[in-house]
Amino acid sequence: MGKHTWRPHLLAAFRKDRADRCSASETGVYSFPQGIRAVPTFDESLKVLRQSINAQGERVLSLTLSAVESYFDGDRTKALAVIAGDEEVDRVDVEIERSSVPLLGLGMNDEFRIRSVLTIVKVNNELERIADCAVEIAEHVLKDQPCTTRVPAVFRVMANSVIGMLRDANRALATGNANLAQQVLLFDDTVAQFKTELLKTAQTDVEDGTITVEFAFRLLGITKSIERIADHATNICEQVIYLQAGLIVRHRPEGWSAPLPPTP
């Protein structure tokens, strides 16, 4: 069979393509013709999702802190900012959910990757609900008259503790720290004790005339919102433990269980 005869321009193109391939294989980076975009891999898309959920966690934490501060300070301007900021949380919430669903359909067989996507979906929902609780607190500031009554000290301690729980839940998620997540779960019972003490204090203060019945009801309403934030923070930590270890924790009357394998 005779030798191939290469036309000069075809030979030059072949040599250039071969040189490009060799260069790409050495650097590990492959270029694509102009106008053609590489389809992100599963891991690349998952990395973007993780960045989005971590940023959402910080956004919701900031919103929650501002809501609590607006109540303590009677700051209507800050309360309005909290309500406005919830729109961004809702927008990102939808974006994360829409980006997560296609990844679940890619059929990845790696259990940790699948748990990662499921965790992001569930944590995303918890964060959106926390933002709703922050809005509830801000709405109390707007609809109630400025309060000159002293807020019970235990209420401030409870609110600050729950903010700390949310901060640690975010950190546990971002760093994959299951031990920190477990510590947040253990603190949940302390928040319940704060609530019990607050109820007793409010009842005593109403009886001796220190606070009005109306103020007591308003205070308890906000306490419920803060308690729900703590519940959502613990839900996030449950997901972190499940993600990192594939284990399930349950809350029982005697307290949180040790992480256990999921039942079939």
Image (spheres, grey):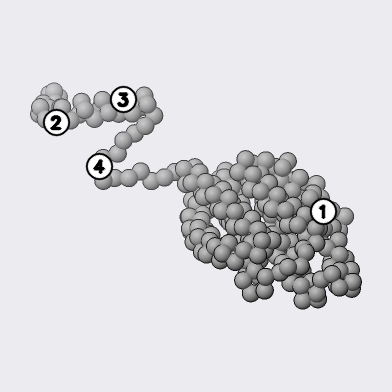
Q: Percent position (x, y) of residue 2?
A: 12, 24
Q: Quadrant of residue 251?
A: bottom right
- Reading the image, the residue beneath label 2 is 10
Q: Nearer the viewer, mark 2 or mark 1?
A: 1
Query: Mark 2 and 4 residues: CB-CB less than 8 Å, in contact?
Result: no
Q: Nearer the viewer, residue 180 or 109?
A: 180
Judging from the image, what secondary structure is the residue with disc 4 in?
loop
Nearest to the eye among marks 4 and 3: give it: 4
Q: Amino acid at mark 4?
A: Gln
Judging by the rendered image, the residue that carries numbered circle 3 is: 22
Of badges 1 and 3, nearer the viewer stands 1
Closer mark to the observer between disc 2 and disc 4:
4
Q: Label 1, on which residue?
A: 190
Q: Amino acid at mark 1?
A: Thr
Looking at this view, is 5 or 222 the one in front? Answer: 222
Q: Report crowding for label 2: few under 14, some 14 to 19, many 20 or more residues within 10 A (C-alpha).
A: few
